[in-house]
C-alpha cells in the first residue's frame, strides 16, 4: 500500500477472482465459464466491429439495447448494458445505497457484494442463510433497504420462487430489490417480466455463462425507466463507453443465435445431472443445483484436501476459505468428457 491511498480505502479487501492459469493445461472448473466457444455469429460480428476500433463505441448502445429489449419483451428504456454484470451491480451500489439505505444480502452469496459496498463506502448487513443454505424469505420483509439476492444463489446453487421475489419487492417499497440472475438460464424462471409490475425491482443478467462470452464482458440490467435513468446517470459519470464495439457486436450475434445458447444450456443441464448422480455415489453431499455448477462436500475429507488433490491431478475447482463453507467446493459443469475426468479423479482420491 502506498502512503497516498485514501484512508477510507485502507482496509479494503479486494474481490479475489478464480484463478486463470497461464501455463499448465488444466481442466478448468473453477470460474463458472461455459466450456463451449461463443456462437460463430458472435465471433464474426465482433471481428467485423474490430475494423472500426479507431472510433469510440456508442455510449447509448442503441442497437444492442434494442436487440436485448426485443428479446426480453421490454422497452429499450427499461434496459442498460454494462461491462459484465459486475458493472451494473456496482452501479446499483453507487446509485442506491447510502447510510440511510444500507445494502442487505445473505451471509453466503456472491463474494463481490461486500466488496462493492466497501469500495463505495456504504454500510451493509448480512442475513444468515438457514443451515441447509435455504433462504428464509421472512427475513427480507419490510426492510426498506437495498436488497441484493443472487437467484439462483452462488455458490449454494439454490433458488427462490418468483412468488417470494414478488413478496420481497412488495414489502420493501422504499428500497430497491436487486435480483442477480447470472445463472438463470440453467433451468430457472426469470423475474425480468416483473419489472413492469414493481418500480423498485432491478434484475441483472450476464452474457458470461449461458452465452459463452465471459471474456467479452457484457452484462444487462432490467428495471423501470426511472431506475435505468439513475444507473445511466452513474454510468455517464464514470465510464460512458463502458461496452466496447467488439463486445456490443458479439452481444447482438449471441442474442440472434438463441438456438445455440439453448442447446448449450440443455447439454450443461444433462452434464449436471450426471455429475450430481456420480458425486452422490462417491459419498459427496450436495444440494440439487439450479446453476452451471455444483456445490459439494465429502464427510470424510476437508474441502481444501479435495481441492488440492484435484489440482494435483490437473483439475481446477473453486475452494473458499470462509469458515461456513470451507468444507465445500464449487465445481463448474463442463463438457461430458471433463465431467467424466472429474468423477474418475474423485474416485481415485476417495478410494486411496
Ligand atoms: N453475479 C454472480 C452471482 C456471479 O457469480 C457472477 C460471476 N462471477 C457475476 C454476477 C458477474 O459476472 P459477469 O461480471 O461476468 O457478468
Image (cartoon, rainbow, N blue to C red):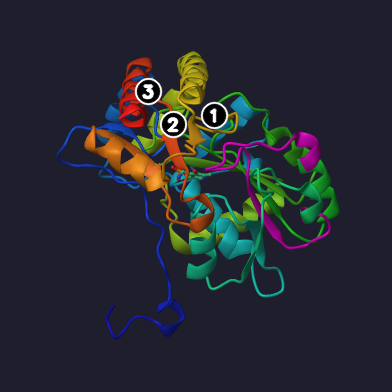
Q: Is residue 171 above or below residue 310?
A: below
Disc 3 residue crowd, few under 14, some 14–19, many 20+, Cα 10 Å: some
Which residue position is annotated with label 1? 67
Residue drawn at (31%, 84%), measured in percent from left and top? 4
User: Could you tell me residue 92's position as x and y percent?
Assistant: 59, 57
Report whether the residue tagged 2 is closer than 8 Å to ligand 1: no
Q: Is residue 245 above or below residue 272?
A: below
Q: Nearer the viewer, residue 280 or 289?
A: 280
Q: Is residue 130 one of those drawn in magenta?
A: no
Quadrant of the rendered structure where residue 338 is?
top left
N-terminal of the pair, mark 1 or mark 2, is 1
Give, as a single range, the part of the protein colored magenta.
140-164
Q: Is 275 on the left or on the right of 167, as rendered? A: left
Q: Which mark is on residue 251?
A: 2
Quadrant of the rendered structure where residue 30 is?
top left
User: Could you tell me residue 188's position as x and y percent?
Assistant: 64, 27
Is disc 1 placed on a helix, strand or loop?
Answer: helix
Is disc 3 placed on a helix, strand or loop?
Answer: helix
The dominant secondary structure in magenta is loop
Disc 2 residue crowd, few under 14, some 14–19, many 20+, Cα 10 Å: many
Disc 1 residue crowd, few under 14, some 14–19, many 20+, Cα 10 Å: some
User: Could you tell me residue 95's position as x and y percent?
Assistant: 61, 63
Residues marked 1 and 2 touching at CB (< 8 Å):
yes
User: Quick one: quadrant of the N terminus?
Assistant: bottom left
Which residue position is annotated with label 3? 343
Question: How many numbered discs?
Answer: 3
Q: Which mark is on residue 152?
A: none
| Nearest-to-viewer mark from 3 and 1 | 3
Q: Nearer the viewer, residue 112 or 84?
A: 112
Amino acid at each position: 500500500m502506498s502512503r497516498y491511498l485514501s484512508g477510507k480505502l485502507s482496509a479494503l479487501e479486494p474481490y479475489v477472482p478464480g484463478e486463470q492459469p497461464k501455463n499448465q493445461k488444466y481442466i478448468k472448473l473453477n470460474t463458472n465459464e461455459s466450456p463451449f466457444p461463443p456462437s460463430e455469429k458472435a465471433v464474426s460480428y465482433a471481428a467485423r466491429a474490430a475494423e472500426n476500433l479507431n472510433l469510440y463505441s456508442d455510449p447509448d448502445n442503441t442497437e444492442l439495447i434494442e436487440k436485448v429489449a426485443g428479446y426480453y419483451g421490454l422497452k429499450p428504456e427499461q434496459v442498460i448494458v454494462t461491462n459484465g454484470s459486475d458493472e451494473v451491480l456496482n452501479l446499483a451500489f453507487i446509485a442506491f445505497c447510502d447510510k440511510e439505505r444500507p445494502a442487505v444480502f445473505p451471509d453466503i452469496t456472491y463474494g463481490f457484494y461486500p466488496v462493492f459496498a466497501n469500495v463505495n463506502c456504504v454500510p451493509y448487513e448480512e442475513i444468515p442463510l438457514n443451515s441447509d443454505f435455504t433462504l428464509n424469505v421472512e427475513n427480507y420483509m419490510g426492510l426498506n433497504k437495498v436488497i441484493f439476492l443472487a437467484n439462483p444463489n452462488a455458490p449454494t446453487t439454490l433458488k427462490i420462487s418468483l412468488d417470494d421475489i414478488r413478496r420481497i419487492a412488495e414489502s420493501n417499497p422504499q428500497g430497491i430489490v436487486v435480483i442477480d440472475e447470472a445463472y438463470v438460464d440453467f433451468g430457472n424462471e426469470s423475474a425480468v417480466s416483473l419489472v413492469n409490475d414493481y418500480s423498485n425491482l432491478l434484475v441483472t443478467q450476464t452474457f458470461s455463462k449461458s452465452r459463452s462470452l465471459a471474456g467479452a464482458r457484457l452484462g444487462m440490467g432490467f428495471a423501470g425507466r426511472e431506475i435505468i435513468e439513475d444507473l445511466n446517470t452513474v454510468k455517464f459519470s464514470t465510464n460512458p463507453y463502458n461496452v466496447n464495439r467488439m463486445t456490443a457486436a458479439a452481444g447482438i450475434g449471441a442474442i440472434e443465435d438463441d438456438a445455440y445458447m439453448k442447446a448449450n444450456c440443455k447439454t450443461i443441464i444433462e452434464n449436471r445431472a450426471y455429475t450430481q448422480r456420480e458425486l452422490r455415489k462417491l459419498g459427496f453431499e450436495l444440494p440439487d443445483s439450479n446453476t452451471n455448477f455444483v456445490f459439494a462436500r465429502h464427510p470424510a475429507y476437508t474441502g481444501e484436501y479435495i481441492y488440492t488433490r484435484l489440482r494435483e491431478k490437473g483439475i481446477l475447482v473453486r475452494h473458499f476459505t470462509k469458515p461456513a463453507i470451507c468444507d465445500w467446493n464449487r465445481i463448474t459443469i463442463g463438457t461430458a468428457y471433463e465431467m467424466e475426468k472429474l468423477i474418475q479423479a474423485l474416485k481415485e482420491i476417495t478410494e486411496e
